[in-house]
Amino acid sequence: MKRRIAIFGFILLSIFICRSFCFAETALSSNGKPDDPVFRVGSETIYQKDINPSEVEIKQAKVRYTQEQFNNWYWSYRTGKAFSLINDKMMELFCQNANCKLDEKYVTEWQTFLDNSVKNMGLPQDEKSRSTLEMMFGGKPSNWQKNKALYERYGGKIYFGNLGYYEPVEARLNLFNEMESSGKIEFYNQDIRNSILEYFKRSMSGAIENDSALQKQTGMSNPWERPYWSSEVQKQSK
């Protein structure tokens, strides 16, 4: 009887250990080898190791998450990393034949806007606060200029951030489709391609037509005609 109880206890322990770790190993092994190519943008190839979380991050996730939570986290991490790399490389190619150069006056106005925002929010006036706010506001002014050029080329629906920034989500999708059709983007992993398309789909679900109240208030024909932190917009919003 004691032997049966011991065996039963061992089985339960094995199930618990497998529940905690086996599902993660299965998810990891299904990706292939670290040096397997995932996709190519232009002449640059991205590999599995470029989009995978680190060993430390995986180890922490195994302890923190249930199976379903881990799967969601792992998918989100790899998809987000892949999307970020594709977007960066796409914009590099796009800006070779588009006006992505930022007007220097906006750099100065951005710094003033950022300093005032840090002060008004009562945050420590240091680089960490500035960097955090910069990320929340949609990134550096150079991102705004690239989005402006992208929107002027492709138009389409936009995403309006609650802190004032805009994202040309449909224009980015159109650029992606165009580059993939022309062979500038090539996928070697269909699962990652499907994840990227799902990422675009989610982004598009919150997109709106170019008719926001802020644009009408400032008289802009498109949301990137004048940045929301510019002196013209700041005066009109007071």
Image: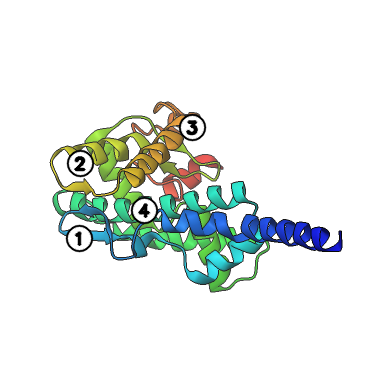
Closest to the observer, 8 or 38: 8
Label 3, label 4: how far apart the Cα atoms are: 21 Å
Q: Is residue 174 above or below residue 100?
A: above
Marker disc for residue 152: none
In the image, 77 versus 18, the foreground residue is 18
Tag 3 residue: 206
Measuring 39% from the left and 38% from the top, which residue is drawn there?
A: 200
Residue beneath label 2, please? 180
Looking at marks 3 and 4 on the same chain, the residue that comes earlier in the sequence is marked by 4
First of labels 2, 3 by sequence position:
2
Alpha carbons under labels 2 and 4: distance apart: 15 Å
Q: What's under tag 1, amino acid-wise? A: Glu
**N-terminal of the two: label 1 or label 2?**
1
Residue type, mark 3 in image:
Gly
| Residue 44 image label | 1
Which mark is first along the chain, 4 or 2? 4
**Neighbour tally class for label 2: few under 14, some 14-19, many 20 plus, Cα within 10 Å:** some
Q: Quadrant of residue 122?
A: bottom right
Name the image quarter holding residue 171. Answer: top left
Q: Amino acid at mark 4?
A: Ala
Q: Secondary structure at mark 3?
A: loop
Check disc 1 and report its element: helix, strand or loop: strand
Are discs 1 and 4 less than 8 Å apart at CB? no
Give the mark nearer the N terminus: 1 vs 4.
1
The mark nearer the N terminus, 3 or 1, is 1
